[in-house]
Image (tube, rainbow, N blue to C red):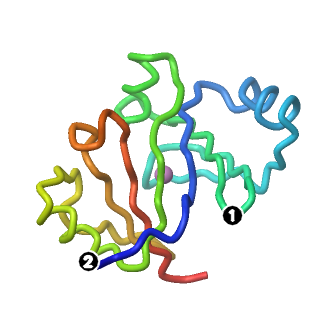
Amino acid sequence: MARIKKINHVAIAIQDVDASLVFWRDALGLNVDHIEDVPSQKSTVVFLPVGEAEVELVKPTSDDTGVAKFIAEKGGGMHHLCFEVDDISEMLSDLKAKGVRLINEAPVELPGRKMAFVHPKSTGGVLVELYEVTAK
Ligand code: CO
């Protein structure tokens, strides 16, 4: 059976990078590791390491993404929780066998990682992301 290694990141949907940094960086004192444009996700992401995990502030750069719709509905807030797993394909088939509803039945391959989302209908309302790191 596949194993969860750690929380990789918690993603927060934001409308504005500078306004968000007033709390996350300036008030809390978290360090901004880097800010990255992620065209494949149509978003700008601020990476704030916290121990072995990260807070990711995700600002959509287009109106047609899931995060943009989330912000339109809720104004922003916690968007998803990401677990790093040792074997994502095995994890997805384990979950499927247990009747868990998946958004991605097969892992999506990205540079350095494979990822998939679990449907909030099966998790009590939390969007759960699974990551397998394939390169360091
Ligand atoms: Co994520």
Kindly state the secondary structure of the residue where label 1 is placed: loop
Secondary element under disc 2, as helix, strand or loop, is: helix
Instruction: Find residue 79 and report its horizontal and vertical position in percent.
Output: 46, 36
In the image, is 30 to the left or to the right of 68?
right
The C terminus - image quarter:
bottom right
On residue 90, which mark appears?
2
Residue 5 higher or lower than 39, as above or below: below
Q: Which residue is mark 1?
A: 52
Residue 44, label in figure: none
The residue under the point 43% across, 34% down is: 67
Specify whether 72 is left or right of 78.
Answer: left
Task: Characterize the local packing of mark 2: few (<14), some (14-19) or many (20 or more) Cα atoms within 10 angstroms.
Answer: some
Residue visible at 47% across and 60% down in the picture: 83
Which amino acid lies under the numbered mark 1 shown in the image of this protein? Glu
Q: For the point 56% across and 36% down, which residue is it?
A: 12
* Callout 1 crowding tier (Cα within 10 Å): few <14, some 14–19, many ≥20: few
Q: What is the count of numbered marks? A: 2
What's under tag 2, amino acid-wise? Answer: Glu
Answer with left or right where residue 86 lies relative to residue 11: left
Counting from the top left corner in percent of width and height, residue 3 is at: 40, 74
**Residue depicted at 69% across the width and 64% down the height:** 52
